[in-house]
Amino acid sequence: MDLNIDSASRTARLILAGDLSVAKAAELLQALRQALDEADTVAVRLDEERVERIDLAFLQLMCSAHRTAVATKKRLFFEEGRAAKLTATAQAAGFLRRQSCILNPGNDCLWLVG
């Protein structure tokens, strides 16, 4: 996990690789909290070649972080879109949506398709 925050532009870039599962949930939560505390825009990028595993805990953390961003008028998104491994996991878990959830009135939901 690599987190870079540009304090001048208040932009954070979080690069994720390796095990993105419940085993790393606490570490990811800490990185997401720091990014959202210190930046107005958070770009998350999955290093697809180095991602070993993605599970439901990761999907839930990302959803929660996005809801927090929306509630605090910040922006959190997947840089370069959703990686193929992430999309496959989100689809298998039933996360992909055709419209944003009630907690996110905009069209920037992490799980929108189509």
Image (spheres, grey):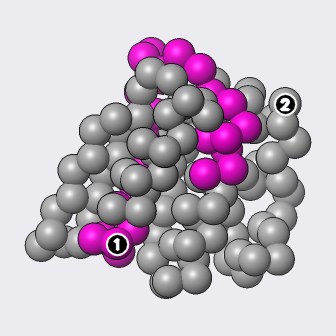
Q: Is residue 3 left or right of residue 79?
A: left
Quarter containing the N terminus: top left
Q: Within 10 Å of the Cα at label 1, are there few (<14), some (14-19), or many (20+) other Cα atoms?
A: few
Magenta stretch, residue numbers: 35-61
Whichever of callouts 1 and 2 sits on the residue coming sooner in the sequence is 1
Quadrant in the rendering for residue 103: bottom right
Where is residue 18 shown, x and y percent of the image?
45, 21
Say which residue appears at 55% left-offset and 30% top-offset.
23
Question: Magenta segment: does it hold 109?
Answer: no
**Which one is nearer the viewer's eye here, 105 or 3?**
3
The answer to whether residue 79 is seen in the rendering is: no
**Which one is nearer the viewer's eye here, 14 or 37?**
37
Above or below, 92 relative to 96? above
Say which residue appears at 67% left-offset and 41% top-offset.
57
Say which residue appears at 34% left-offset and 72% top-offset.
37
Say which residue appears at 28% left-offset and 38% top-offset.
2
Q: Which residue is mark 2?
A: 92
Quadrant in the rendering for residue 10: bottom left
Q: Within 10 Å of the Cα at label 2, are there few (<14), some (14-19), or many (20+) other Cα atoms?
A: few
Q: Which residue is mark 1?
A: 37
Q: Is residue 106 left or right of residue 39?
A: right
Q: Is residue 44 left or right of residue 96?
A: left
Q: Amino acid at mark 2?
A: Ala
Q: Secondary structure at mark 2?
A: helix
Q: Amino acid at mark 1?
A: Asp
Is disc 1 in contact with disc 2, using a CB cutoff of under 8 Å? no
Question: Magenta segment: does it hold 52?
Answer: yes
Q: Which numbered circle lies on residue 112?
A: none
Where is residue 22 shown, x and y percent of the image?
61, 34
